[in-house]
Amino acid sequence: MKNWIERLERLRAHRAAPWLGIALVVISLFMLPFALASVGTAWVRITNLAILFALLSLGLNIVVGFAGLLDLGYIAFYAVGAYCYALLASPHFGLHLPFWVILPIGAAVACAFGVLLGAPTLKLRGDYLAIVTLGFGEIVRIFLNNLSQPINITNGPQGVTLIDPFRIGEVDFSRTDRLLGLDFSGPIKYYYLLMVVLVLAIIVNLRLQHSRIGRAWVAIREDEVAAQAMGINTRNVKLLAFAMGAGFGGVAGGIFAATQGFISPESFVFVESIMVLSMVVLGGMGNIWGVVLGAILLSFVPEILRYTVEPAQKAVFGRLLIEPEVIRMLLFGLALVLMMLYRPAGLWPSKRRKREFAETDPS
Amino acid sequence: MDIFLQQLVNGLTLGSVYAIVALGYTMVYGIVQLINFAHGDVVMVGAMVALSVISALAGTALPPLVIVSAGMLCAVPVCMAVGFTMERIAYRPLRGAPRLAPLITAIGISIILQQVAMIIWSRNPLGFPQIIDNPVFELAGAHISAIQIGIILGSFLMMAGLTLLVFRTRLGVAMRATSENPQVAGLMGINVNRVISATFVIGAGLGAVAGVMVGTYYGIAHYTMGSLLGMKAFSAAVLGGIGNLAGAMLGGVLLGLVEALGAGYIGEIMDLCHLSGISEALAARCAQDNHFVLFGSNYQDVFAFLVLIAVLVFRPSGLLGERVSDRA
């Protein structure tokens, strides 16, 4: 036994050990969709949605976690990205641009919307800002709902259908291809794409966190006046936080539109903003890995509940008393309240955030 | 029928409801500097409870006014209990925590209230039983119904009552002292916790009445009705200057008027056919169906938000607010 531990210790100390670890993670992430597909394709789709939410949470984390600006209308940027993709790659306007053209456009438009929201709200305090962002999210949704008249831009509540899937050359993401004896179905291809995007997003976030900009965001979050006195251009840095956060939302929205093939304003209601916020709060505001964890937990737990609570209720009461959708929402609500009461820094807090919540505000 | 007067009447009705809900926000904000995000949902609970009671009694021989009063008498204590519990479990432990913490629990409470209401009542909009025969009077070319008169009178009575409470009673003095400075108020022998609880309870009670008013006015109640109503009432409170009672009343009425008049006129204002000279295509389009409305009354709900953003940008302390708050 002792021999084993010694061997493991030696292995850990080995120069190649981190690479071995990374290789293991990569291989397991590579194999994951096939394992999931053997249970059911639905689970691959659920995983894809979870990754999309992880992307959104990372974006919102820049605004809420790093810069400390509570944004309750974040889903608007997701909507903007999704509609950009839908309008530029569907029969609605007869445009069929390739995705590598649209995704940057979507991100840029979302950034512009971020600045549009940020500019008038720069001077507002935290809670006022929250309400204005909430209003902004609603305004965007109301416009999406109504911009079918007098000129049909968004097709109103019916939404946009027949959105093009991603295509790279001959590879179409909506069809199944056989390669090396493995079936690569549409959801599995999107899984790999989303994984690549997520890894890129995490790298960008990790690099941002300790960069000059990242530290400026944290400084603003802690004390805006002091940050300004230290020579930080608070206006630009805050706008940048809004724009970067929105950009992530835009990219996620574009991919969402492509995977679903159909979008409508229904997908971008206030509750979705709250869902993303819950993920950020649950995981730990300001900590990149915590936020990803929060997104994955809150995406999967409701689905698992769907497969366990529904049959359980039917077995015990003979019928469905509480729908899984309701349980999911109750879970979000409870997560927000209980986390704030008992573990305000999140499941996996950033070190700095932990310290901050431990102190009590004298005011 | 005069559209302007008619919209004025509608706006006044709507505005007095907004004012009552806004009072709930502004009282809580004035005393603990917290946006009670769940206040709109307390209003919803009030409407739902009243609806259940009124539906249950609707078949009996009791006179309609008694039935409605019974609904209100049940809704108010239930909402007060909700307000009290909410403050106790979700806000009090977080006093002194970073500002975002209570705001996030408030959002959580709001979601929980909505979902619980959905489980108890229904996912679908519920109709308020039409038990009061609602005579419509004609007033200088505008129609005003008995319910509208009741709402306007009732709201003004409640506002007067609240003003008396805050400025003429011991509890009112304690509330004002606590909002001025909780520490010093505590040193003067005021039980700060009790005063804060009382504020939440009173706000929730007002909310319950507002819920019954909205329910009888529109004739329906839905478990999500609180969100939009709450947002608008909060906008009204900010418009008037949050923390300021008179401001909330003024803001509510103003917002109601803006919304009603906006809905009445925006279609006309934004009809580009006035300007059909500017382009050939537009002129052709106008010749077809006479209208080219850029933004119609379906954008009604946007007004409250635009008003809110405009106020916050140009006059962050609101119309009547004097305190310029600069705390981060």
Image (cartoon, coloured by chain):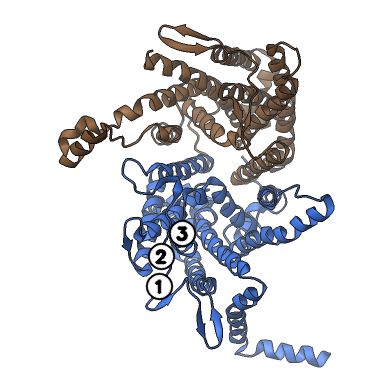
Q: Are marks 2 and 3 on the same chain?
A: yes
Q: Which mark is residue A253?
A: 3
Horizontal side of residue A237 vs B91, given as left or right: left
Horizontal side of residue B70 vs B273, given as left or right: right
Residue on which the image places disc 1: A167
Amino acid type at image mark 1? Arg
Image quarter where the C terminus of chain A lies is top right
Q: Is residue B321 above or below residue A119?
A: above
| Position of residue A222 measured from the top left corner of the image (x, y, whole percent) | 54, 52
Amino acid type at image mark 3? Gly
Residue lying at 59% horizontally and 84% vertically, measured from the top left: A23
Q: Which chain is blue?
A: A
Residue nearer the viewer, B229 or B293: B293
Q: Chain of mark 1?
A: A
- Asked if disc 2 and disc 1 are in contact, CB closer than 8 Å, the reply is yes
Residue on which the image places disc 2: A164
Is the residue marked by circle 1 packed among few (<14), some (14-19), or many (20+) residues within 10 Å? Answer: few
Amino acid type at image mark 2? Asp
| Position of residue B156 measured from the top left corner of the image (x, y, whole percent) | 57, 13
Q: Residue B267 occupies which quadrant of the picture?
A: top left
Q: Colour of chain B?
A: brown
Q: Chain of mark 3?
A: A
- Asked if disc 1 and disc 3 are in contact, CB closer than 8 Å, the reply is no
- The answer, for residue A359, to whether it is visible in the render is no
Q: Give the CA separation, mark 2 to mark 3.
A: 14 Å
Residue nearer the viewer, A240 or A92: A92
Q: Secondary structure at mark 1?
A: strand
Q: Is residue B210 above or below residue A45?
A: above
| Position of residue A29 measured from the top left corner of the image (x, y, whole percent) | 59, 77
Is the residue marked by circle 3 packed among few (<14), some (14-19), or many (20+) residues within 10 Å? Answer: many
Residue lying at 37% horizontally and 44% vertically, measured from the top left: A148
